[in-house]
Image (spheres, rainbow, N blue to C red):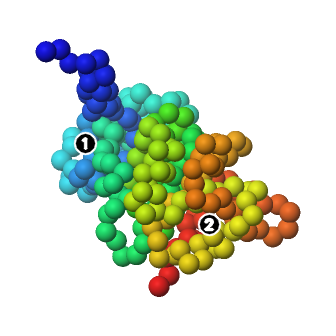
Amino acid sequence: MEKPNWVIEKEQAKKAANQETVWLFGIHAVKDALANPAREKIQLVATRNAVAKLADTIAESGIEPQICEPRKFAAPLDPGSVHQGAALEVKVLNWGTLADHALAPGTGAPRLVLLDQVSDPHNVGAILRSAEVFGANAVIGTQRHSAPETGSLAKSASGSLERQPYLRLRNLAQTILDLQNMGYFVLGLDGTAQETIEQAMEGHFDKPTALVFGAEGPGLRQRTKETVDKLVRIDSAGGFGSLNVSNAAAVALYAAQYTS
């Protein structure tokens, strides 16, 4: 019996994902990736100076570096990449499923960050850093129109990519509905909202909470606005109330912290 086309396509997509590799660059990003036992490493390209800086981590990882001269850096990176003499080819991390993180036990009520088509890798990297600092269970983007795992994202995340779960799921609205069915309180950040985060969270700080952020400019899509439990804003002084999405995520995570 032949397999249905959808089964074949799903298997092919899974196989392609398993084969996908990315080049990480920069001393910090490479060091943290080398130290991550969950990260499958393929090859390390580095200058002698970078190898000296990473000596202990390289030794522990067991990888043999390909040493090259600074002016003849062998890794296939964009010419503008600030690689600091180190680049590591790796397989993309597999962080599992939404339930793996949404329902994971922790020290307090879980927090999730959802990104509605946030495509700038620098913003996503910075959001991963904030999510790690404030103990978010995961950062969740969309499969399309969101930043994939890249060297630029890893460098902006400054090591957090190796520790902070980052999932990319097919349908954000469905993800929100799934979280609501799991008991999550889902808030969408919108500068025109009537309530502040603190006002909306009153009486809900002990509940699992997901914060949803839109892309620079467009903000949340209409379907997202219709699906969240409430739209909220970050309180601001005066008439100027706009923050970069990565800054907004940091402030919102702090405002939504669980306090017993």
Q: Quadrant of residue 249?
A: bottom right
Horizontally, residue 1 falls left or right of residue 156, namely: left
| Residue sitting nearer the eye, 139 or 61 | 139
Disc 2 residue type (three-letter): Val
Disc 2: which residue: 251
Q: Crowdedness of circle 2 by 10 Å Cα count: few (<14), some, many (20+)? A: some
Percent of width and height locating residue 66: 28, 35
Residue 235 percent location from the top left of the image: 73, 68
Question: Could you tell me residue 76's position as x and y percent?
Answer: 41, 27
Q: Residue at x 70, y 42 (%)?
A: 218
Q: Secondary structure at mark 2?
A: helix
Q: Secondary structure at mark 1?
A: loop
Residue at the far left: name it: 1
Q: On the rendered structure, is 194 left or right of 93? A: right
Which residue is rendered at x = 21% and y = 40% of the image? 64
Q: Nearer the viewer, residue 103 or 46?
A: 103
Instruction: List the residue tagged with mark 1.
Output: 40
What amino acid is labelled 1 in the image? Glu
